[in-house]
Amino acid sequence: MLLERTISQLDIGRVPAQEARQMAQLGYMQWIASLPGDANYRRAALHAHAMAAPYISLSPAVAEFCALLKQSLTSPAPLPLSLPPRRRRGGAGARRIWRIAL
């Protein structure tokens, strides 16, 4: 199931707060996009929270994911979701350096 995959992708241990927030937002978007069109959102969100809750103390990203789920159930305001800023990750130059190092 995609929920377990999402939780395992978020459960990577300690990360900076900003990175945890970005990961949680992406995880939430991935999770909600996987729901069937006729799904009961409240039931699905409570289930997702129950599945992720055991990992809250170990992973800030999972804790942020759970916070988003709670907020979606309690607040009528839109969730603060956004894609992370685009950034270069090295491209071909980084791959060439990696090959040279071998």
Image: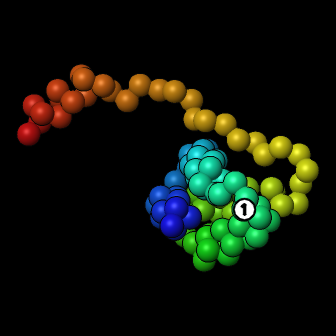
The residue that appears at 57% across and 29% down in the rendered structure is 85
The residue closer to the viewer here, 22 or 31, is 31
Depicted 101 relative to depicted 7: above or below: above
The residue sitting at the top extreme is 93
Give the image location of residue 7, x and y in percent. Answer: 54, 64
- Residue 11 visible (yes or no): no
- Residue 65 visible (yes or no): yes
The residue that appears at 18% across and 29% down in the rendered structure is 97
Give the image location of residue 79, x and y in percent. Answer: 78, 46
Rendering quarter of residue 98 = top left
The disc labelled 1 sits on which kind of residue? Ala
Depicted 46 relative to depicted 6: above or below: below
The residue closer to the viewer here, 18 or 65, is 65
The residue closer to the viewer here, 33 or 93, is 33
The residue that appears at 83% across and 43% down in the rendered structure is 78
Element assignment for label 1: loop
The residue that appears at 52% across and 54% down in the rendered structure is 15
In the rendered image, the quadrant that contains the C terminus is top left
Mark 1, Cα crowd under 10 Å, few <14 / some 14-19 / many 20+, is few
Depicted 23 relative to depicted 91: above or below: below
Q: Look at mark 1 in the image and give the residue it sits on.
A: 39
